[in-house]
């Protein structure tokens, strides 16, 4: 099963040390001397991209420098991640990605040009968004049991952001637990997977709620279940996967910010302070909650522990699924 026993505790973490809050703003920001580049290793329109664009202007105002979002997609996020891992460790190049997916990478790929546990330093988590299991409106199923039964008599294309991604492995876990049968179709990111499911080229999709819910609300996709252990207040009538066939099931996307390893601790902490303040501001928090995401911040040490735990958890899932890529 995919579940995260410590998730509720992590959602309560503020990610701001009292000592850091006492530092003058100027002392925290004096390191920023040129534009800040936030690399999103996926195409535009996905959960990471949405959050990056939400925080870019407030961060620019806080650091008194332009903030540029660069979508550097490819190789299941590895292309953009590698670029950040090899960037100068001065705080001017950051990675905003699905941390869960990053934790999976080392288990899925036999060869990587970087080591996510050694070449990157966690700054803070920003938000958690459960996966939504959705289908094209033409699919004659309204519940998970109905979808499983249909999959045994009809070929269903299951769109995934990439082979070995968190949504892919979540789909595999549901398939194994329920006996469903579907054909996985890989894409270069959540936005493309959503687009083809909306267009009918794929019939089933599992993706972060933040990017998927608007298409459900517009009627372009039909929601089957959500991957949180308990129902979402935003969608109280939408059952969970756990209550409709896979007890204890939980999965989702964790968006966070990382810097190249070797970035000075004072810069990492200064970035943490500003990013936590921004993501927890009433306006941005409200906008995230309205789309099904929860603000979840951490200190750099808490981020490191979370990443270690996730890497161990996903390694087991990957081994059980037998997913390996060159």
Image (cartoon, rainbow, N blue to C red):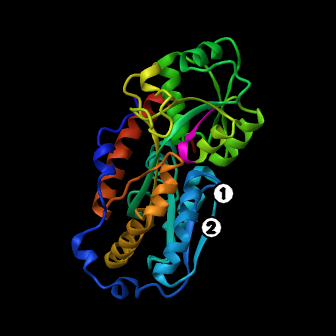
Q: Position of residue 160 (x, y in %)?
A: 62, 38
Q: Position of residue 326 (x, y in %)?
A: 58, 45
Q: Residue at x 71, y 19 (%)?
A: 155
As drawn, 35 above or below 276: below
As drawn, 316 above or below 30: above
Q: Quadrant of residue 77?
A: bottom right
Q: Earlier in the sequence, mark 2 or mark 1?
A: 1
User: Dot 2, how many residues are within 10 Å of its Cα: few (below 14), some (14-19), or many (20+)?
Assistant: some
Residue 323 seen anywhere in this rendered image of the structure: no
As drawn, 156 above or below 215: above
Q: Residue at x 72, y 32 (%)?
A: 202
**Highlighted range, magenta:** 205-210
56 left or right of 90? right
Q: Position of residue 108 (x, y in %)?
A: 50, 42
Where is mark 1, residue-wise? 44
Q: Residue at x 59, y 39 (%)?
A: 163
**What mark, if any, has residue 70 been given in the picture?**
2
Q: Nearer the viewer, residue 234 or 57?
A: 234
Q: Quadrant of residue 17?
A: bottom left
């Amino acid at each position: 099963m995919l579940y995260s026993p410590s998730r509720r505790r992590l959602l309560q973490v503020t990610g701001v040390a009292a000592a850091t809050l006492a530092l003058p703003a100027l002392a925290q920001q004096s390191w920023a001397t040129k534009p800040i580049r936030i690399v999103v290793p996926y195409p535009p329109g996905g959960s990471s991209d949405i959050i990056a664009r939400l925080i870019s202007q407030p961060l620019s105002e806080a650091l008194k420098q332009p903030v540029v979002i660069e979508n550097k997609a490819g190789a299941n996020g590895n292309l953009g991640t590698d670029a950040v891992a090899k960037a100068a460790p001065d705080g001017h190049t950051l990675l905003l990605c699905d941390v869960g997916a990053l934790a999976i990478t080392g288990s899925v790929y036999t060869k990587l040009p970087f080591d996510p546990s050694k070449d990157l330093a966690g700054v803070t988590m920003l938000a958690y968004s459960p996966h939504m299991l959705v289908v094209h409106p033409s699919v004659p199923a309204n519940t998970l049991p109905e979808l499983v039964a249909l999959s045994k008599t009809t070929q269903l294309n299951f769109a995934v952001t990439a082979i070995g991604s968190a949504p892919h492995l979540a789909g595999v876990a549901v398939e194994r637990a329920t006996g469903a049968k579907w054909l996985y179709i890989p894409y270069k990111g959540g936005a493309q997977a959503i687009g083809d499911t909306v267009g009918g080229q794929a019939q089933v999709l599992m993706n972060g709620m933040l990017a998927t819910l608007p298409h459900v609300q517009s009627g372009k996709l039909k929601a089957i279940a959500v991957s949180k252990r308990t129902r979402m207040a935003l969608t109280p009538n939408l059952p969970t996967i756990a209550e409709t066939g896979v007890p204890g099931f939980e999965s989702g996307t964790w968006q966070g910010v990382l810097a190249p390893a070797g970035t000075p601790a004072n810069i990492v902490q200064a970035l943490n302070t500003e990013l936590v303040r921004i993501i927890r501001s009433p306006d941005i928090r409200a906008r995230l909650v309205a789309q099904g995401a929860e603000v979840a911040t951490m200190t750099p040490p808490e981020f490191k522990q979370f990443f270690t735990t996730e890497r161990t958890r996903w390694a087991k899932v990957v081994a059980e699924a037998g997913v390996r890529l060159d």
